[in-house]
Amino acid sequence: SKVFVAMRDFCKTNTDIKYLMVTTPDRLTRSVTTYFVLKSEFEKLGVSIVTAHSSAELESPMREFIETMMITLANMEHRERSRQVKQALQRKKEQEDKGRS
């Protein structure tokens, strides 16, 4: 996305930036794959993605585990909402079709 490219380019030219802070990992993306691609891109620039509520121990295995669970949960919730909306639209369409019969 344009925002990611702008952030990445800003970090490339401002090498004193060491952290990209987000409130929660899913504010960056709800895709598990995309999140880890973005994380890798920033790590190549020497920038760590941290959450606003992360502990002071920034590189701990527990923090990485929690981060992975947070992005996985956000992805699951997003997919579940999408499924529910599709089902509701399908039911509405079926009801409208019955009303026309």
Image (cartoon, grey):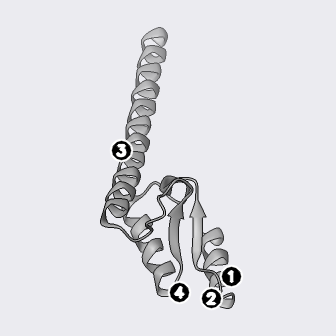
Secondary structure beneath label 2: helix
Quote the CA–CA distance across marks 3 and 4: 30 Å
The amino acid beneath tag 2 is Lys
Residue count near mark 1 (Cα–Cα under 10 Å), binned few <14, some 14–19, many ≥20: few
CA gap between label 1 and label 4 equals 11 Å
Query: Which residue: 48% across, 9% down?
Result: 99
Binning the other alpha carbons within 10 Å of mark 4 as few (below 14), some (14 to 19) or many (20 upward) gives some
Q: Hey, what amino acid is under mark 4?
A: Leu
Q: Are the residues flagged by discs 2 and 4 in contact, CB closer than 8 Å?
A: yes
Task: Say which amino acid is labelled 3.
Answer: Met
Instruction: Give the distance between the C-alpha atoms of the residues marked 1 and 2, in whole angstroms.
Output: 5 Å
Name the residue: 47% across, 72% down.
38
Q: Which of label 3 and label 1 is nearer to you?
A: 1
Callout 3: 10 Å neighbours few (<14), some, many (20+)?
some
Could you say which disc has been placed on residue 45 in the image? 4
For the point 68% across and 82% down, the residue is 10
**How far apart are labels 3 and 1 at the CA level?**
31 Å
Mark 2, Cα crowd under 10 Å, few <14 / some 14-19 / many 20+, is some
Question: Which residue lies under the disc numbered 2?
Answer: 12
Residue under pointer 3: 76
Residue under numbered circle 1:
10
Please state which amino acid type lies under the numbered disc 1.
Answer: Phe
Q: Dot 1: what SS? A: helix
Whole-Å distance between the Cαs marked 3 and 2? 33 Å
